[in-house]
């Protein structure tokens, strides 16, 4: 189980990182084209926006593995006993899975409908916008389910950010 | 009672929204209240592409907007946005109402499940508004002009030498204000309503293209209606069309007069010269974008 | 009932500790189910479309630029520059902490990047000099809120996207309020430095030392010029300027300071991707929620309610600021921005408040929320960085909260504090 969680976390952040790098490269190319050739690229804006969807929806799977989505921390905020928070956490995870399942089914239904709609600049199929939504929500379902089982079994959860020493995944 | 949710991306005051509301009243009257069209303006039900796919997903039943959006399904629908493709407004409307467009529409209904009921609501001729005067074809050279982020538009402006800058409509005002682009183009009434004349003081009446608004419905929904109900929809939309188009013409005239009053320089172009320039590249554009050869030949045959 | 599902549902779920993104999605789904007018799959459609926006792309890029700055040696150089100039004053490192944040603000759009990156250096130096740990953490938490007011700024980009106001103008409008924030905090430190007998550097560093520290930090200080010059010179959109900021900070780290290796770059990308995914999932979810809020005519209802109290733009802004302050005690700022702006902005604009002014007031108010318990994100970060107990940090943070609230009043009452520079530059 930890191996699955580990694979999801690493794979997700790898894809998200590549997407972020690709956004940088594409927009960098856009600036270069305009400054040096005077002509704009037709596809850069649309392609960068597409990478953004992969960055966010696939990247969020890592957050789900590590169970670090931004939330009010009941233990810190209201001094709620850990045991009650643990029970609440089980309920929260079930609700998250339900929400994610609805999103996954939605994306699954949308994909065939938009398969033959082209994006205006790149002419890529609009379905490319919904693959990350589908894959991301499925990964988040698996990750949340693993955390759910770990919580019931009281085994130690996946380390929030064991592989680096910066702890907050948030930025303003 | 059948409820048809109709989506538009335009704001409530826009002529297409007003016309759609009138159409809804007429449809209710013609069907004795059997069909109720609920109008949702201002992209409340999503943007154009969401509404196009939404008609198949069942999130929406109808969409009223420019027919060029249909290029997402079939590139040929983009062709009517081409610069100087039509001689004038009547030519453009006649083509949209004509036989070959009907074929495109039938193909769309069969293959993509969207039916274009009516497509003769004018959007008005599009003109340039710019921070530096644009009058001759030479002024177009290197002109940083905003174009919709769509291949056909970009090629259309790049071929004659303009620096076509693709930009979402939402960013265009700021882009023009801050000098990222020097010019943009839309119908005069649209430019005035969106206050572009306050930041760019040159309106060039290029009258470079004429798009039409289409009234579209999900094919599955259409098939579920009775013949009388279908006829009522078409009859209502057709009845609104002359009024709609008259309003657009009046709005354009008023907008240009008000812009002139508010200090905008209004320029007219040597239309023959511009037409020649853009028509000369139409073949190359068509190959690059990939329009059907038959369609291209038919359109060229209509040129005066 | 619909309003109750949306508003009550959201706050109920948040208070049960449900993640913000999922609280937004679940209350939206509940409303769609209750109304039965729309199919549930519209949520997946909206989620994808919410992020299909070019201006939003500025956010991951500004986050990445800050990560790279923290990894490229720029942060240390800025700290050293501030220290050689201000170290000699009593309470010098307190002033340095604030001045360094003001300088760093021009490079970073993120309060968290400031508190976690620059903050680590500042807290270490202050502890070593004998400052109270809780105080060091509090100054760091407070001063890092300047980052998103002085441009560039992640929350301001988001406000620009939600409101449609030009991001370039919003950036300009933040300058003066941001500098005032720094000066107000420094004034407070000057007052208590004597009373608490804060330490200071033994000797004045001397002009040559200041000069060489300035030369060292100079390339980093150029970054805001590139960003704002690019936007205002009509060369780049804010998103492109954000990409240019990343490329420039990479250039600093790899070529100029030579402190950055490929591994550091990959680490920055990873941290940037992680922050972006977490935040933008909330933004996308809030987009759906905000859309449902508007279809339920909630802004109109709020407008009606507020208008019965007052129609004066200043009082209206004050009431909105109070509501935002309270929300900031319990919620994450990006989520508040995404939920509250669509509700309050139309009300404020109808009463005659300038959009740009509204944006600065909103972001400044939400910055205070980073410091207010129980949910003050910056407090958690400096707690981790400093190791000081939460209560000790909180005790020292209260005066800063008070200062910022006091500063908020003139920023609300005199719109020209924000708008002055915009007017100068647009004419
Ligand atoms: Na600081
Ligand atoms: Na900043």
Image (tube, coloured by chain):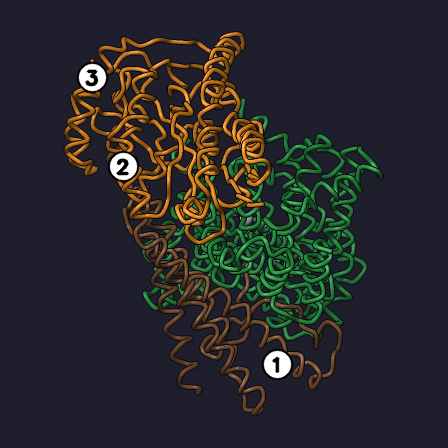
Q: Nearer the viewer, mark 3 or mark 2?
A: 2
Residues beneath discs 3 and 2 located on the same chain: yes
Tell which of C120 and C233 is nearer to you.
C233
Q: CA distance from mark 3 to mark 2?
A: 21 Å
Chain B colour in the picture: orange
Above or below, C6 against A43 in this view is below
Disc number at residue B104? Answer: 2
* Residue located beneath label 1 in the image: A90
Question: Residue C333: x and y, percent?
Answer: 63, 56
Residue at position x 53%, y 85% in the image? A157
Q: Secondary structure at mark 3?
A: loop
Q: Which mark is residue B303?
A: 3
- What shade has chain A been given? brown
> Label for residue C288?
none
Dot 2: chain letter: B
Closest to the observer, C43 or C272: C43
Nearer to us: label 3 or label 1: 3
Q: Are marks 1 and 2 on the same chain?
A: no
Relative placement, left or right, of B178 versus B285 is right
> Crowding near pointer 2: few (<14 within 10 Å), some, many (20+)?
some
What x and y, as percent, mark residue A28? 32, 47
Whether residue B113 is situated above or below residue B293 in the rendered picture: below
Dot 2 falls on a residue whose secondary structure is helix
Dot 3: chain letter: B
Position of residue C296 measured from the top left corner of the image (x, y, whole percent): 67, 47
For numbered disc 1, what is the local secondary structure? Answer: helix
- The quarter of the rendered structure image containing the N terminus of chain B is top right
Q: Quadrant of residue C54?
A: top left
Q: Residue furthest right?
A: C309
| Residue A76, percent from left and from top | 70, 74
Q: CA distance from mark 3 to mark 1?
A: 70 Å
């Amino acid at each position: 189980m930890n191996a699955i969680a580990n694979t999801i976390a690493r794979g997700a952040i790898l894809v998200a990182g590549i997407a972020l790098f690709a956004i940088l490269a594409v927009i960098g190319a856009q600036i270069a084209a305009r400054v040096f050739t005077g002509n704009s690229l037709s596809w850069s804006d649309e392609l960068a926006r597409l990478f953004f969807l992969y960055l966010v929806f696939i990247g969020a799977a890592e957050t789900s593995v590590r169970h670090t989505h931004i939330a009010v921390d009941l233990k810190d905020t209201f001094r709620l006993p850990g045991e009650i928070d643990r029970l609440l956490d089980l309920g929260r995870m079930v609700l998250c899975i339900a929400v994610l399942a609805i999103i996954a089914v939605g994306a699954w239904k949308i994909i065939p409908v938009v398969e033959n709609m082209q994006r205006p600049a790149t002419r890529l199929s609009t379905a490319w916008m919904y693959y990350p939504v589908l894959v991301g929500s499925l990964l988040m379902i698996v990750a949340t389910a693993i955390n759910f089982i770990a919580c019931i079994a009281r085994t130690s959860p996946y380390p929030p950010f064991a592989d680096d020493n910066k702890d907050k995944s948030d930025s303003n | 009672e059948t409820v048809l949710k109709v989506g538009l991306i335009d704001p409530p005051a826009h002529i297409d929204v007003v016309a759609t509301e009138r159409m809804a009243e007429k449809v209710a009257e013609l069907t004795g209240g059997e069909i109720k069209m609920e109008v949702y303006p201002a992209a409340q039900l999503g943007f154009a592409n969401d509404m196009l796919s939404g008609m198949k997903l069942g999130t929406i039943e109808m969409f009223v907007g420019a027919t060029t959006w249909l290029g997402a399904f079939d590139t040929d629908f983009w062709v009517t946005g081409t610069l100087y493709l039509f001689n004038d407004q009547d030519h453009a409307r006649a083509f949209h109402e004509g036989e070959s467009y009907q074929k495109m529409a039938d193909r769309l209904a069969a293959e993509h499940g969207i039916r274009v009921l009516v497509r003769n609501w004018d959007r008005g001729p599009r003109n340039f508004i710019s921070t530096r005067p644009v009058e001759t074809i030479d002024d177009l050279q290197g002109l940083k002009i905003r174009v919709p982020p769509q291949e056909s538009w970009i090629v259309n402006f790049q071929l004659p030498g303009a620096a076509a800058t693709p930009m979402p409509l939402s960013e265009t005002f700021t882009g023009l204000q801050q000098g990222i682009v020097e010019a943009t183009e839309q119908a005069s009434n649209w430019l005035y309503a969106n206050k572009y004349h306050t930041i760019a003081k040159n309106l060039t009446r290029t009258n470079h293209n004429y798009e039409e608004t289409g009234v579209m419905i999900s094919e599955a929904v259409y098939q579920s209606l009775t013949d009388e109900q279908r006829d009522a929809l078409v009859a209502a939309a057709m009845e609104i069309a002359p009024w709609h188009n008259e309003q657009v013409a009046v709005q354009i005239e008023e907008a240009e007069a008000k812009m002139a009053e508010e200090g905008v320089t209004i320029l007219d172009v040597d239309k023959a010269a511009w037409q020649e320039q853009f028509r000369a590249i139409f073949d190359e554009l068509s190959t690059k974008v990939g329009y059907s050869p038959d369609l291209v030949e038919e359109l060229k045959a209509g040129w005066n | 009932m619909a309003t109750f599902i949306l508003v009550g549902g959201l706050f109920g779920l948040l208070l049960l500790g449900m993640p913000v993104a999922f609280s937004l999605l679940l209350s939206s789904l509940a409303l769609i189910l209750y109304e039965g007018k729309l199919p549930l799959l519209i949520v997946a459609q909206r989620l994808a479309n919410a992020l299909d926006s070019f201006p939003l792309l500025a956010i991951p890029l500004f986050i990445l630029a800050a990560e790279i700055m923290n990894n490229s040696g720029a942060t240390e150089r800025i700290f050293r520059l501030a220290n050689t100039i201000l170290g000699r004053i009593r309470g010098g490192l307190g002033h340095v902490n604030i001045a360094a944040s003001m300088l760093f603000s021009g490079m970073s759009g993120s309060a968290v990047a400031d508190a976690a990156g620059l903050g680590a250096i500042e807290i270490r130096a202050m502890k070593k000099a004998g400052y109270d740990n809780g105080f060091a953490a509090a100054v760091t938490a407070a001063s890092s809120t300047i980052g998103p007011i002085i441009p560039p700024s992640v929350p301001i980009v988001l406000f620009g996207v939600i409101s449609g106001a030009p991001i370039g103008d919003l950036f300009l409008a933040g300058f003066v309020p941001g500098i005032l924030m720094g000066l107000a905090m420094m004034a407070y430190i000057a007052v208590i430095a004597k009373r608490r007998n804060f330490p200071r550097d033994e000797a004045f560093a001397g002009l040559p030392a200041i000069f060489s520290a300035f030369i060292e930090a100079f390339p980093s200080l150029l970054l805001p010029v590139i960003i704002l010059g690019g936007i205002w010179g009509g060369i780049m959109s804010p998103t492109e300027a954000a990409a240019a900021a990343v490329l420039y900070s990479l250039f600093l780290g790899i070529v100029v300071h030579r402190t950055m290796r490929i591994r550091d770059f990959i680490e920055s990308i990873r941290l940037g991707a992680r922050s972006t995914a977490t935040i933008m999932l909330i933004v996308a979810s809030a987009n759906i929620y905000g859309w449902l809020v508007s279809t339920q005519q909630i802004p109109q209802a709020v407008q009606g309610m507020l208008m019965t109290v007052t129609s004066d733009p200043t009082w209206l802004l004050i009431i909105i600021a109070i509501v935002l302050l309270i929300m900031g005690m319990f919620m994450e700022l990006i989520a508040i921005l995404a939920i509250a702006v669509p509700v309050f902005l139309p009300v404020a604009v109808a009463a005659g408040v300038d959009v740009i002014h509204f944006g600065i007031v909103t972001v400044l108010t939400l910055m205070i929320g980073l410091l207010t318990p129980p949910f003050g994100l910056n407090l958690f970060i400096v707690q981790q960085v400093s190791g000081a107990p939460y209560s000790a940090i909180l005790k020292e943070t209260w005066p800063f909260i008070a200062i910022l609230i006091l500063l908020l009043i003139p920023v609300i009452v005199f719109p020209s504090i924000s708008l002055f520079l915009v007017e100068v530059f647009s004419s």
